[in-house]
Image: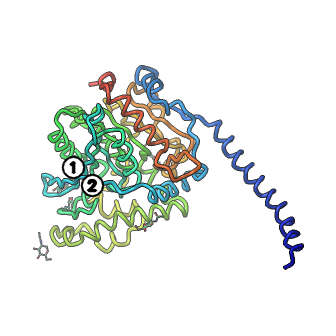
Amino acid sequence: MDQLSIVKLAGNTVLPLAYVVTAALLVVAGYFLALKTQTSMLFCKDGKFKQFLIENVPVVNEKYLPSIWGFNGYTHTVLATLFRNMIIPTVVYEREILTLSDGGEIAIDWRYPKSDGPQSLITIVILTGITGDSQAEYIRETVNKLFEKGYCCVVFNYRGRGGVKLKTARTYSATNIEDLTEALKHVKSKRPNSPIAGIGFSMGGTLLGTFLMSREQAENKHLVTGILISVPWNVTQACKNAEGSWLMRKMGQNLSHHLRNVVLKNKDIIFDQDNNTSLDYNIIKQCNTIREFDTAYTIKMFNYSNVYHYYEDASLSNKLHLINVPCLCLSAADDPFLYFRDIPVQEANQHDSLAILVTSGGGHVGYMDTFWPFTSNNFMLKLIQQYFDAIMVDQNYERFVNY
Ligand SMILES: *[C@@H]1O[C@H](CO)[C@@H](O)[C@H](O)[C@H]1NC(C)=O
Ligand SMILES: *[C@@H]1O[C@H](CO)[C@@H](O)[C@H](O)[C@H]1NC(C)=O
Ligand SMILES: *[C@@H]1O[C@H](CO)[C@@H](O)[C@H](O)[C@H]1NC(C)=O
Ligand SMILES: *[C@@H]1O[C@H](CO)[C@@H](O)[C@H](O)[C@H]1NC(C)=O
Ligand SMILES: *[C@@H]1O[C@H](CO)[C@@H](O)[C@H](O)[C@H]1NC(C)=O
């Protein structure tokens, strides 16, 4: 090719390229402009807790602008996982194996504070999603952030998770708080003078919410406050949504794969010791959705007659009034597991000390808010850190407890 034709070719491509770039920029600008009009909504009864949040947790008042990578709830959820997995380093924990009263075992992973600041006296108990453990990417970034701020973090891993083998056939249930109660008693015995706050992600939020509503909590006041992130408020509907579209079925399959795996890996313990004829290995092996797994396994372990009884029991909506400690919840209107109509905003509006912050975007445990996705900060982490700094450090939680 001679010089002239190269110049000609360049001339021919520059113009279309300019069009494409301009068009792309317009799309990006339009996207951000469209989103700018959508403010986050804080649902809580007008009163001192709501006022406290508005004054002390700045992100509550900010417009949440999702990263352009999160232009839709599903991609937001998947890409947030992907990007975080690439950049968030493994956390080095001090592990304790706690033997439970029925012989089961769980891993308790501690990240002790690095210095003696006011935050070091506070313990934050972290509950993962249903298939997560202390090295799940959203747990790593949360622990890193809280550690950096000086808090003492401890991650509660469910039975069969975090590399611990099962000792009995029992695994996770969103409605059974026995294991969490034992773990909290253990945490308290190790740090007797430290107030304990809880944070639960997704189904971990369901379990934490169930705990906060329990008699055990009312009588023994284990936790002083809680944060619930991306809770499937209506578990029945969340499982339906997980089977709704092709993309969601893929995600649901992946989750059920992780659930199934615990049973397959612990087959010897579950089937040879218990001889429980109500469990069918061949059916469990083929479960492809969360609902199928819960039908074949979870409800049998926890004595529910059918899976919908379990899901309705696990749904936190309609029960929020049972929570008596201050509680901040974060839900995205585009969470693919959730419909906006299932977020109990009316109930929150009647509650003195429970608030739900609903953002227009964020996906499920996504909440990326920067164009450059490889960063270790996001909206969710800011909320967690600002809320704990505000409510824990000067024991402000005492002002909002309703016992
Ligand atoms: C959850 O959603 C289902 C419909 O999908 C509805 O029948 C049920 O009553 C809802 N449960 C709660 C607790 O709101
Ligand atoms: C699904 O699970 C498999 C097995 O753990 C994992 O390798 C894969 O990355 C997961 N895919 C998605 C989309 O999460
Ligand atoms: C389970 O069944 C096997 C053989 O089917 C038997 O050897 C074993 O004793 C049984 N275990 C219990 C706890 O019943
Ligand atoms: C055995 O199955 C029954 C239901 O038939 C259930 O109630 C029980 O919890 C199961 N026990 C074990 C140890 O798996
Ligand atoms: C389920 O029922 C069986 C048999 O009545 C009982 O042994 C077991 O402890 C129950 N499990 C739970 C989690 O309540």
**Which residue corresponds to mark 1?**
179
Q: Position of residue 229 (x, y in %)?
A: 42, 43
Element class at badge 2? loop
In the displayed structure, would residue 101 be above or below residue 402? below
Q: Marks 1 and 2, how far apart in space? A: 8 Å
Element class at badge 1? helix
Q: Residue furthest top?
A: 47
In the displayed structure, would residue 384 be above or below residue 204? above
Is residue 372 shown to the viewer in this render?
yes
Q: Position of residue 143 (x, y in %)?
A: 35, 47
Which residue is depicted at the point 32% across and 30% down?
392
The residue lying toward the viewer, choosing from 12 and 378, is: 12
Give the number of the disc on residue 28.
none
The residue lying toward the viewer, choosing from 394 and 314, is: 394
Question: What kind of residue is marked 1?
Answer: Asp
Count of number-bearing discs: 2
Q: Position of residue 83 (x, y in %)?
A: 49, 57
Q: Are marks 1 and 2 in contact (CB under 8 Å)?
A: yes
The residue lying toward the viewer, choosing from 295 and 123, is: 123
Earlier sequence position, callout 1 versus callout 2: 2
In the displayed structure, would residue 88 be above or below residue 8? above
Which residue is depicted at the point 34% across and 72% down?
285
Left or right of residue 107, residue 235 in this image: right
**Which residue corresponds to mark 2?**
158
Quadrant position of the C terminus in the picture: top left
Is residue 211 shown to the viewer in this render?
no
Question: What kind of residue is marked 2?
Answer: Tyr
